Image: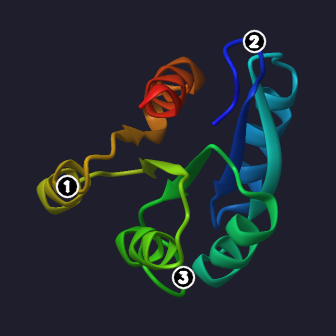
Amino acid sequence: MTGPDEPVRILLVEDSDVYRESLVYLLRMRRDVEVVAAVADGASAVRACREFEPDVVVLDYRLPDIDGAEVASQLDAGGSRAAIVYLSASAGRDEYDAASSAGAPLVRKDEGVDALLRAVHAAARR
């Protein structure tokens, strides 16, 4: 993990090009976070996590190849020390339960960037 004065290093995993690029743009304007990589699917997330060793993986729960829970499981099995923050456009009870049992916060996309940043910083402190 980073020191208290260093930005939190984020890997963003989001399959929607528009949402991913918009979020990267907004996050890159901040000094308290650094987007080290942004990818569109689970397989790329696993590779990017190994390569960039982020502090936090902001992970869309529903991805086209494998779901976010499986990506998180693969990251954990691969020895990643990154914290997970799930994103979801329409989180249902199953997603909240899975995130909760994994000890990871789930942020709905309509909650906005401030809610996401609060979750990222809280996850980075763990």
Residue 82 is left or right of residue 30, and the answer is: left
Residue 123 is left or right of residue 15, and the answer is: left
Q: Mark 2 points at which residue?
A: 5
| Chain-order first, disc 2 or disc 3 | 2
Q: Mark 1 points at which residue?
A: 92
Q: Which amino acid does label 3 sit on?
A: Pro
* Number of other residues with Cα within 10 Å of mark 1, as a class: few under 14, some 14 to 19, many 20 or more: few
For the residues marked 2 and 3, what is the alpha-carbon distance in whole angstroms? 36 Å
Residue 62 in the image: state x and y as whole percent: 43, 69
Q: Which mark is in front, 2 or 3?
A: 2
Cβ atoms under marks 2 and 3 closer than 8 Å? no
Describe the colour scheme in one phrase: rainbow
Q: What residue type is labelled 1?
A: Gly
- Depth check, front residue: 95 or 4: 4
Mark 3: secondary structure: loop
Q: In which quarter of the image is residue 41?
A: bottom right
Q: Name the residue under label 3.
A: 64
Q: Residue at x 83, y 48 (%)?
A: 36
Residue 88 in the image: state x and y as whole percent: 41, 51
Residue 19 is left or right of residue 111, and the answer is: right
| Chain-order first, disc 3 or disc 1 | 3
Q: Quadrant of residue 4?
A: top right
Residue 93 is left or right of residue 71, and the answer is: left
Mark 1: secondary structure: loop
- Depth check, front residue: 28 or 56: 56
